[in-house]
Amino acid sequence: KRLDKDFALFLDSHGYDYFIKSYDKTDLNNSPALIICATDDNGLNRQVYDDAKALNIAINVVDTPELCDFIFPAIVDRSPVVIGVSSNGKAPVLARLIRAKIESVLPSGIGELAEKAGQFRQTIKDKLHDINHRRHFWEGVFGRSLQGESVGELADELAKFTHDNPNPVGEVYIVGAGAGDVDLLTFKALRLMQQADVVLYDALVSPEIVDLCRRDSDKIFVGKKRSNHAKSQEEINELLVRYAKAGKRVLRLKGGDPFVFGRGGEEMLACQAAGVPYQVVSGITSALAGASGAGIPLTHRGVATSVRFLTGCYRTGESFDGLTSPYHADETLVFYMGLHALEDLTQNLIKSGLATDTPIAIVANASLPHQQVLTGILSDIVAKQNEAGLPAPAIIIVGKVVGLYRG
Ligand code: SAH
């Protein structure tokens, strides 16, 4: 019986003793702290296990989870940062692959940075009294490091941070979450979602997207489905300003794009009026997601040269009552919030001069797995929709481009 060469070398170089012999219960007499049993004899394994238990010694019988008091997780060691991955004995290869994946995304300097952070913690506490301020500092430093950017000496980072952020004032992010599909989020939206302290989100933002926001952020539903506003716009504006002034980073997460029928403009003005810093981040508006999802180009060479975005429902609650400027045959119209007013909408388009056989499409739940499309012409779409009953939210596309729809 011989030990594996590398293992023997390891033991020798670290000055460990080892004995090559058959198992005997008396081997346990000098009370080892723990036992690893790795024989290929199940009966012997069981016996060692029972002996260990009788003496209250922790044991790991290799590849036999039911005979283990402790496990060896696959480890990523960037001390002082240590990450253990365990599948509880179910799938060790998977645990190893997960570890490799984590290894590959962790920048090499992360352990050193954590070590320095530990030494620097008290200094930061002394200099930055506000807990939110401190968290912003650390999130900036660690966030950049995790993204592979270089981080300077912490004293320099602190000087720069206090210069850039003289007061622990928060900020408002007015962010478009896209039309619904998680994959339509922008990287910027995702980054801000993951650093926000407070999230105010709409009904049109899907739960999968809200789930991607920072886990410990406060998430506030502010509603906004037609005629079901959990909070009024004024209340929302006020909340944004109030949280930001309390030093929070407030994410206003909105369906589609914040500046397209999203009242993001009012929120921006409220921030301006209150002197609160803000950023606006564009999102993929439902007109665009609906058009691409349905395969209806909004402009098309020889068919349409311009697009108008309109609403089927005015601020007063009244339905669309006709175009304010003449319709050109080479133009595409896209209506938001129009489904419930489809009849008024089509009649008033005809009154505005559109031919009764102008093609029209309804795209419901654009970009989502349950997206539906219904096409027709101005004079028959109401009957078709009464039959089909497409649900909200839906956008409505009007014009010759709808003829390009192929289902
Ligand atoms: N800011 C949003 C629009 C908000 S107004 C944006 O840029 O998309 C609400 C209207 O948007 C709904 O009435 C509907 O017309 C449209 N809408 C939002 N999400 C949609 C979706 N996934 N599919 C179709 N229409 C949608």
Image (tube, rainbow, N blue to C red):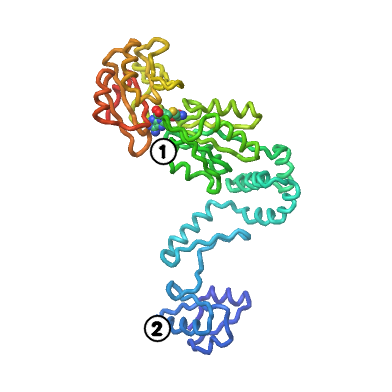
> Residue 8: image x %, image y %?
55, 77
Task: Give neighbour class at mark 1: few <14, some 14-19, many 20+ (Cα, 10 Å).
Answer: some
Task: Give neighbour class at mark 2: few <14, some 14-19, many 20+ (Cα, 10 Å).
Answer: few
* Mark 2 / mark 1, whichever is N-terminal: 2
Visible in this render: residue 285? no
What's the residue at 49%, 36% (across, down)? 222
Q: Is residue 291 above or below residue 55?
A: above
| Discs 2/1, front | 1
> Residue 217: image x %, image y %?
55, 45
Q: Is residue 159 above or below residue 98?
A: above
Number of on-image labels: 2
Secondary structure of residue under mark 2: helix
What's the residue at 72%, 50% (across, down)? 125
Instruction: State the image quarter where residue 356 is shown.
Output: top left
Q: Which mark is residue 43?
A: 2
Instruction: State the image quarter where residue 7 is shown.
Output: bottom right
> Residue 232: image x %, image y %?
51, 31
Q: Which mark is residue 181?
A: 1
